[in-house]
Amino acid sequence: MSEENQTEKEPKNKEEKEEKKEVSESAEEKAKFTFKCTQCQRCCLERGPIPITFWDLEMWARNGVVANFMPYLDIYDKHDGGLDLILKPLPPPPKEGEEQPKKDPFGSIPIEDLLTVKCPLYNEEQKKCLVYDNRPLSCRVYPLEFDGKNFTIVDVDCPGIGQEGMSKEELKEMRDTAKTMYYELTRMRIALPVLSQMISQKVMMDLMRQNMEAMSKMTDEDRAKLDEIFQKNKDTPEP
Ligand code: SF4
Ligand code: SF4
């Protein structure tokens, strides 16, 4: 660096000196981020959909537990048009005196209505995560997030933030996990719309093939009956 440039960067007056101090203090503050989970369980109780990544699917496959997670997986159509694979929150049980709602076999309650509902894998009686060793990446890094450029805190009310006792190694590990989460989520968000479209097309083609096969196996008598039904429907005036 030239002497001229160095001189340019020197603070010229008292205000500038104070401004520089403020900047360096806030940088120091940032470096002091410290976290220790207090096990308050808040993030398991009211977190809404938990994104699932390829990292999670690979871990579950390695540990032979994919089937255990299948009933809880769903695809979330987000407002921005994107898709996320998620752990779907379950509807809350009825309150005392309320009727048990009929079981919905298609789970068609909009996810928006379940955003503040507990994670389906949290057991309230036992006060614990039922899949702790296989918990998703997103749970391992909460409440830190990396957006490709910066680290942010997704839940400023998490009581673990500011708790002393975090070592440099733990901080580095948390930051690395946040970066992994970002890259894995990006991979999933690129792959999911493509896979989803291909699967829908395949399901549609399979249905059409099955229909055509069924039609080709019909006897003349069955065909006549079918024609009769179609004719009846045609002749029935619409209400
Ligand atoms: S991460 Fe935060 S909100 Fe979640 S259990 Fe730990 S302290 Fe509580
Ligand atoms: S998977 Fe476990 S750690 Fe993650 S939100 Fe659910 S209960 Fe909590």
Image (tube, rainbow, N blue to C red):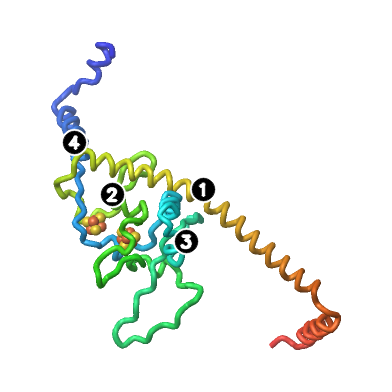
Q: CA distance from mark 2 to mark 1?
A: 24 Å
Q: Label 1: which residue? A: 190
Which of 162 and 11 lies nearest the eye of the viewer? 162
Which residue sits at x=18%, y=44%?
166
The answer to the question of whether label 2 and label 3 lie on touching residues, with beta carbons closer than 8 A, is no
Q: Nearer the viewer, mark 2 or mark 1?
A: 1
Residue 47 in view here: no
Q: CA distance from mark 3 to mark 4?
A: 39 Å
Q: Cβ of disc 3 within 8 Å of ligand 2?
A: no
Q: Position of residue 37 (x, y in %)?
A: 21, 54
Q: Label 3: which residue? A: 76
Q: CA distance from mark 1 to mark 4?
A: 36 Å
Q: Earlier in the sequence, mark 4 or mark 2?
A: 4
Which residue sits at x=64%, y=63%?
203
Q: Earlier in the sequence, mark 2 or mark 3?
A: 3
The answer to the question of whether label 1 and label 3 lie on touching residues, with beta carbons closer than 8 A, is no
Q: Label 4: which residue? A: 28
16 versus 64 height, above or below: above
Q: Cβ of disc 2 within 8 Å of ligand 1?
A: no
Q: Label 2: which residue? A: 153
Q: CA distance from mark 2 to mark 3?
A: 23 Å
Quadrant showing the N terminus: top left
Q: Amino acid at mark 4?
A: Glu
